[in-house]
Image (spheres, coloured by chain):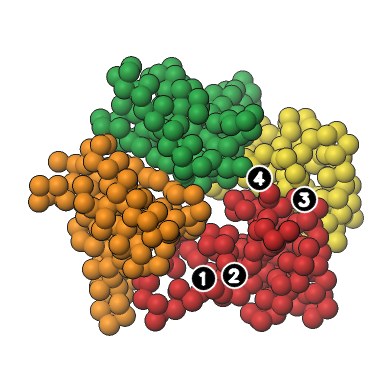
Chain colours: A yellow, B red, C orange, D green
Amino acid sequence: MSITTKQAARAIELAAAKAQEIKVPVNIVVLDTGGHLKHFVRMDGALLGSIDIAMQKAKTSMLFRMNSESVGEFLRPEAAAYGLENTNNGLVGFAGGRPIFSNDEIVGYIGVSGGAVPQDLLIAVEGCRI
Amino acid sequence: MSITTKQAARAIELAAAKAQEIKVPVNIVVLDTGGHLKHFVRMDGALLGSIDIAMQKAKTSMLFRMNSESVGEFLRPEAAAYGLENTNNGLVGFAGGRPIFSNDEIVGYIGVSGGAVPQDLLIAVEGCRI
Amino acid sequence: MSITTKQAARAIELAAAKAQEIKVPVNIVVLDTGGHLKHFVRMDGALLGSIDIAMQKAKTSMLFRMNSESVGEFLRPEAAAYGLENTNNGLVGFAGGRPIFSNDEIVGYIGVSGGAVPQDLLIAVEGCRI
Amino acid sequence: MSITTKQAARAIELAAAKAQEIKVPVNIVVLDTGGHLKHFVRMDGALLGSIDIAMQKAKTSMLFRMNSESVGEFLRPEAAAYGLENTNNGLVGFAGGRPIFSNDEIVGYIGVSGGAVPQDLLIAVEGCRI
């Protein structure tokens, strides 16, 4: 099962509400399990450079079916996985990209960018409560 | 003035309602006046290939501040503007991309793809009634 | 010899004066003989989509050391040069790109876009009178 | 408000005067607030490789509405934002890209490259005194 229009809208709504609560304008993207764009919102005032970062976080999460910061563990210099960050037209290894579950199954991926990393994470986690 | 989060959501809502009414699942994109992504929705069942077509229609409209089908007039073989379609990383010259006006000023651009061209047009026109 | 900063600025100045005279806001680009950007001006009100068209016209002229519309002769369907328009990351075969001469030698290339093709041509010709 | 032809020309003029004073030939680019090219000058003798560096500095500044060296803080290995430098088709995190203000509002962005980084910075700062 891949995420529905209604589920994606709900994820965006939850994430945006948290972003407004903590007063951080962000870009929020939802991809389906194939990595294709399903829903996207740029909140007023969000940085233009964060559009692509949000996309790349969600994409990275989708490619490895894990949180973007978990992929980041393999991107650390100590991991010695030379060039890994350049595969797949670029990977992003910090928090804000996560799988969205429904009935214990991954149905899509969320990516959030625009605030400090812990803020992006907080907002992304909230978006996954669909 | 560039389009607000609220205006973009309203444009998507109006377009999606028309798409549901005529039973055509589409991709709907809203760009700001600089061409940066503001809001995107893919309705359940919409073709994946239409994601990019919707994006390119909106982009083409933005680049020339006119409807995408008006740009298409310059892309007809008779216009002899050889290679024009390859500029700007590709132009799309059929209906579904249009400027969104507010108070007689362009505030953004909509792009719709997924149905037959007249259906995409109908949905895009509806999305501009913000 | 390749075009100097002073010569390029003069070409832009002459072209822009003509554009203002005929009231057509355009994008004007000057490349050196190696095709590298030397000078660029976007006049207020010029279409964003014409930035790349101006660039591509000048590039096409540079690649074949002739006017862009002369390259266009080879891009006509009758020329049967299948795929030619896709070489060099895209060629543009209509007027507005031309070599700039100094002492009977090509020193650079101008590209103009934003108006109707005959207007772009008129402006480009003026820019070559350095 | 986005930068005017006249303001952009003034920014280039100021920056180029400083570059000549300190005898460093540079590339100078001015973008509007949406990141679209407004004005560009390559001074005689400036390195060809610095054309794109100047462009990327200005782009990076535009994307995050801050100086390019401030974006660089997030690109340091200690920041552990793995892959950030690959987003947005590449970011540049050293000095020479800056917002241009007019009446306490950002109207555009300047990017300078060709000299040592402190020289590029000095020239960019001067270009912002419009």
Chain of the residue under label 3: B
- Kindly identify the residue that appears in the image at 65 percent across and 53 percent down: B32
Q: Nearer the viewer, mark 2 or mark 4?
A: 2
Residues at circles 1 and 2 in contact by the CB criterion of under 8 Å? yes
Residue B118: mark in rendering: none
- Kindly identify the residue that appears in the image at 40 percent across and 54 percent down: C20
**D83 or A15: nearer the eye?**
A15
Residue under numbered circle 4: A51
Quadrant in which the N terminus of chain C appears: top left
Residue under numbered circle 3: B5
In this view of the protein, can residue A66 be seen by the observer? no
Chain of the residue under label 4: A
Q: Residues within 10 Å of mark 3 (few under 14, many from 20)?
A: some
The image quarter containing residue B13 is bottom right
Extreme residue toward the left, this view: C104
**B130 or B86: nearer the eye?**
B130
The reply to whether label 1 and label 4 mark residues of one chain is: no
Q: Amino acid at mark 1?
A: Val
- Kindly identify the residue that appears in the image at 87 percent across and 54 percent down: A10
Chain of the residue under label 1: B
CA gap between label 3 and label 4 equals 14 Å
Residue under numbered circle 1: B71
Residue under numbered circle 2: B67
Q: Residues within 10 Å of mark 4 (few under 14, many from 20)?
A: many
Q: Is residue D54 left or right of residue D78?
A: left
Q: Amino acid at mark 3?
A: Thr
